[in-house]
Image: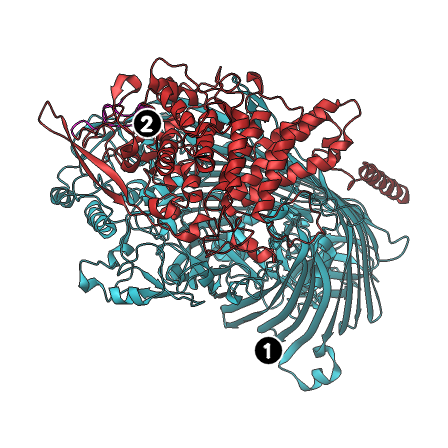
Chain colours: A red, B cyan
Amino acid sequence: MKKSLIYIISISCCLFFVLSCERGLLDDMPLDKISNTDIFKDSSRVDNYVMGLYTYLPGVYNRFNGEAMLSSATDESTQCLSSFELKAFNDASLQPTSHPDQIWASAYEGIWMCNNLFENIGALYASTSQLKKEIFVNETRFIRAFLYFELVKRYAGVPLLKNTCSFDDDPNVPRDSFADCVEFIVNECDSIIQSALPEIQPESQMGRASRVAAKALKSRVLLYAASPLYNGPSIEGLNDPILGYGVYDMTRWEAAAQASSELLASYPTVIALYTSGATPQLKYSKLFYTPASNKELLFVKTRQKDNNVEKINAPVGYTNARGGVSPSQNLVDAYEMINGGDVNPDNPYSGRDPRFSASIQYNGALWWSNRRIETFLGGLDAQDASVNATKTGYYLRKFSDPAAVIYGTEVTALHYFPYFRVGEILLNYAEAMNEAYGPEVDHYGNGRTAKWAVDELRKRVDMPILSVGLTYNLMKEKIIHERQIELAFEEHRHWDLRRWKLAETELNKPLRKVIITKTNDISIPYSYEYSVLENRTFLPKMYLYPIHSGEILKNRSLRQNPLW
Amino acid sequence: MKKIFYIILLFLFVLVNIIQAQDVILKGIIIEEGTSEPLPGVNIIIKGANIGTPSDLEGRFSIKTKENDVLVFTCLGFQTQEVKVGKNRVLNIQLKPSVSELEEVVVVGYGTQSKISVTGSISTIKTDELKQSAVVNLSNAIAGRVSGVVTKMISGQPGNDDSKIFIRGLGTLNDNSPLILVDGVERSFNQIDADDIETFSVMKDASATAVYGVRGANGVILVTTKRGKVGKPVVSFSIQGSIQTPIRTAKPLDAYNYALLKNEAIRNDNNGLAPGNENYYYSSDEDLQHYLLGDSPFTHPNNNLIDMFMSKTIPQAQTNLNVRGGNNIVKYFMSLGYLYQDGIYKQYKNQDYSTNASYNRINLRSNLDFTISKSTEVGIDLNSSFRSRHNIGVSSRFSGESTNPEYNNMFELLMRQPANYSPLINPDGTYGNGKNATIYNPLQIVQDGGYYHLNQDVLQGTFTLNQKLNFITKGLNLKAMIGVNSFLATEQSLSERPFMIEYDKYGKYTNNVLSEQLAIINSGTDNDWQRIYSEISLNYSRKFGDHAFSALSLYNQSQNFEKSQVPTGYLGFVGRATYGYKNKYLGEINVGYNGSNQFAKGHRYGLFPAFSLGWVLSEEGFWKKNIKSIDFFKFKGSYGEVGNDKIGGYSYYYIQTYNNGNANFGNYNFGITPQSYSGLLEGKLGNDQVTWERARKTNIGLEMRLLDGKMSFEGNYFYEDRRDILLDFSSVPMVLGIGTPPGNIGRVKNTGGELELSWNDKIEKFNYFIRGNISCAKNVIIENGEAVQKYSWMAREGQSIGQHYGLVALGLFMSQEEIDQSPTHIGNVKIGDIKYMDLNEDGVIDEYDERPIGNSNIPKVQYGATVGFEYKGFDMSVLWQGAALFDVYFSNGAVWEFRDGGNVFEHHSGRFNPEDPSTWANATYPRLHDGNFPNNHRKSTYWLKNGNYLRLKNIEVGYALSKKLLSKLPVSKLRFYVSGTNLLTFDNQMTFDPETENERAYNYPQMAQYTLGVNIQF
């Protein structure tokens, strides 16, 4: 008996020995997790790291809840949905705790990634070439500068973090002055312009940072910095260095003109307006979905082929269409007649600036399946057609590729959203030149005046050029108008109205719509009735975004923007 | 199904025949004292010789003895009796039931203890009670039956209805779920057949849980399953059928009232639309007339979806067959259980497949104990469970692909879809389609929408070895155990969509068409994992006169393998020493020393000690002399530390990580023919200081038995201080640009107590009992790492876990002047909208005015009481159960009007109608809005409901046939019973059940259940 007992004990002990000797039960390391050291020794992983950085660039098109465009926070449009986050901009119900355009966290996350690269790039395997290293560094620099500008245009001066913080650092980081922020971004752009980065990326690498992209960023940053919101006292009338320069200085406009002029030096050879199109309308509309042989796109948000823009914004008469953006009557009214005359009240959509039909779907516009858009009451796309139908009588056409198909066998298309394009640079140049030197002063002696730049854009779409001898004020109005038309729905007006300090006048105007009724009269088939869709409110505090109140509480050195 | 029964029966009987006959010298019959009931399974042992035999089914025994032997008769529940053989050749023994419960044994961590010597806080449920509720899921059977436990049943969906269980309320801001062990191995008990369970114990204080070290702080539930007993095979068979019916369903308004209210909401919002003209949803007088008369069902439908699609009688059947017995060599318990539970939806014709929800389960268990030698026992337990869950497949309207099928949106759909939304079938026989892309046609879903099917296979095996080491020293015992759990789940779904077209109220087909999607079948594994657990222990237990010692030392380890993860593991050492003097002074030390690989090297191991003391005053001489009515009186107290490492799965917070990007974020495309490049994304910084939570627990208790054991009482008070709770540093600003790892910064205090009281007595042959328990637990967050809040009322610190925060509603605005004089509310507020309190008096209602409102969402008090009797074969028991001091918040589609194109319910009829001043004074609902209205739809006291409820949880009435009647039948026991569960609920009459947790309340409803069953024993 004893024997069998000892036998059993020894067997069970052996069993345990076998089980326990599996090497280190608690020593299994989570090797599937990637650490800093893993990344920064191998240039192919740094490649991935830099790819990851690009995704921190802000979203585009219908980026709010996958439905709304930033244009619907301005007088350009509203959304077909009755409630959407951006509405808070329109009824002034923005809160420092819940802000629809909150980018603070993701921008600083991207900035941390950039700083982390600068600190670790030295650890690369020695076989990595110096050129490759320099390209990594300068792409990263560009993204950091871009992200900082995204912050500055929302909040004015922000904390400039040039290094990563460790867990033990003091988290109470104060805001830097607006001037320092602008200077930092401009200096970064200058060093990128001097770097080994290509002047223009080859088409196979379209979407990557380049020297022209840096020049374009610099052009915009200096233009914004020279604008009334910053180039002068703050909205409370104070000289507050965090919010702006405090005192107006004309040389800021000169610097802005200079930056745009430097970029335009290679115009129209290396960079140029896109003009491949049979009609003026196509010359303009195709530039947004034709990246090949397109010298106008300076820096774009690239993505896979899709038909999301079409699907989200298409008139609801098409299967799978979701209505999306409803352009306002306010914007429609801004499109001039080609002949400079008045709009025909019985046929209001004919004879308009070709950019109108390229940007907006109106009643009678010809679209997919060779069908005309029907926004008259009872029509396929009318206000009463479905819950997603337009609110204003219009749909968005800009960015939509007529070759894309959203129903049946779907067809996708390329949509590269222009962060920067030559059209904008020409307008930046025109504005800065007009402010610094006047409408028709040839300061650089190359014939390129403010008027010249605006005319370049009007010529593309066969619109009459500006008349000679406009005053500074009239020219300013023309440029403001041209920006509204040329850059509609490209996330410009939201910022332009703020930096011009015009938001209080423009964004307090009610948003208007049209109701179209079919008549029995064949000669005048439709009657048009214009009315207010909704009232809009803009308060002075909204010139700058509020910093999230949670952030203010956590970071005791951080100051909230005025009036929030 | 029948075949399986026969095969199992055959198998069991073959095994039973192994029992051998023995020689006869001394014979006798054992009966219970004062009755003529024979006692089977009494152990008769020759003292000092370790030779023995059990009594058989008729209480008879025979044993080979010598004249000067002493026979020891032992049986659980009876006092042990010793008899000298002498000249007796026939012995008729009467055993007294044990009154003092001295022999009663309680399951404790890694062993058992006599109940009297327990100094920790442990409560148990009797298995008969667990069976009473006829529930499928055992986690739903414990509410009200055990003290110190808070349960919440969130959903009634078959196979997906686990209750949340919290022991002594909430102690941490992280996972509060207790550690659950079945037969000593970490396993779920929810789906075990109630017939298989022997004991169910809840370990509450540090003394009882310290041995579980880093995993014990949330309390531990120990379940043991039945094992074989020496004796003839006893075959038990039970079968029960139940009808379930939803306790409560929402009551949507009919088409006419819906249209009336919709018109009113549109007018209230005055959203710039001319009535009757542009807005599709506005109903003209003519429309209203059609809705009222129902004379045009295609253009003006009036669908009562709840009645059309939800069944009021849902069948369920459960059966179990088991056999229990054994001899000197083998003891066995084997069980086969089968369960079928039907779903809530009515069965619609579908020629190809079933779409209704249902649940099937087969449980097989075999627990075998082999006596290999006098000192060696080996146990082999095998358990398997095969479950399958079927559900409606709700597919996306756009792609036809199945989207998150477990999301129970069929039920939500029935609640959300307005009665006049669209005809379900168009005049031409096609399916109707609506304008709102998020509301589907329910008829299409139940008839042609596909299904979702989930199979879960559970395999569990345990091998144990018990070796007495008396040759080294008396009372020493070695135990080794290996347990393996394996879980595999596979899923399959079929999704399809027929052609659908909108037929509008003007009687024309529109272009709102969804084209046909042919069937797509998807399948995959849902989840699979394996856990291997092993332990080896030395146990020592011996009495030296008045001194009783016991000691345990144990090593254990476990390793979990889960899909695509580095295996996680634990290892630990456990030690315990107990001492008792004359069962009067008791002391105990428990120590757990554990390691977990979730933490950095150097921070992996922790020591968790606890000690406890007990003093049985009733054993003192002075007590025995003076206090006669109190038979037993014990003070006990414990203090110790226990840990919690439930910090969220595959965490590894100690290393800094980067994440691989995906197509949605992280990867990037370049070039005019987009080429995707994979990107890396920032993760979190590492914090190698991360470690487990540590709970310091104190328990003081009192146990009493009075009046010859008729009455018993136990009370416990506890205090817990949970430190080092792992939390994110919410005070770190985002400007630093990187996610900080969590740190051990939180602290929560939790105090409370439990009372248990019972009374058993009989009046002649009428036996009756009353049992009641009440548990209270209140926690306070001492530290949670939050940033300093702008106003003191915004702070979470100082409040309970799960505390509701929101605005304070002051009722509805009654006049324009009142609005003008009030602080600025959000949006275009008019009379009939909700008025709020401006806490910071800044003239604006905003998030700074949100303060703690009501109680937390977990009850602070839970109680239960059972009353029952037994008389001449009849028995009855009634369980009441309730919870108090908690609040429920409902939002969205659950209570708000026209939410996301949704519905209105009966409770909206009481709205404030600005056009009708007679409704103003007694309005129970604000002014209606067509869609979201931010001012009214903010979390506030207006939407908070007191969750207190009292339930008639269970009534069972049974009748057992008497011995006389049975003697003519080949059965030894036969009992019929009827029972009802969740029969009555007293609460604040909300639209939904008070236990529902989801704010939108689209979970499958809770059920009442009526059961008829029979138990037979052979």
Mark 2 highlights which residue? Answer: A467
Q: CA distance from mark 2 to mark 1?
A: 112 Å
* Residue at the extreme bottom of the image, as rendered: B626
Q: x, y percentage for residue A107?
A: 57, 41
Mark 1 highlights which residue? Answer: B707
Mark 2 lies on a secondary structure that is loop
Q: Amino acid at mark 1?
A: Leu
- Crowding at dot 2, Cα within 10 Å, few <14 / some 14-19 / many 20+, comes out as few
Q: Camera-side residue: A370 or A392?
A: A392
Horizontal side of residue B270 vs A144, given as left or right: left
Q: x, y percentage for residue A297?
A: 49, 23
In this picture, is B970 found above or below A294? below
Q: Which range of residues does the magenta coloring cover?
A: A346-365
Residue B378 visible in the shown view: no
Which chain letter matches label 1? B
Name the magenta segment's main secondary structure. loop
Q: x, y percentage for residue B769?
A: 51, 68
Q: Camera-side residue: A9 or B507?
A: B507
Q: x, y percentage for residue A272?
A: 47, 19
In this picture, is B963 found above or below B818? above
In this picture, is B305 found above or below A520? below
Residue B359 visible in the shown view: yes
Q: Amino acid at mark 2?
A: Ser
Which chain letter matches label 2? A
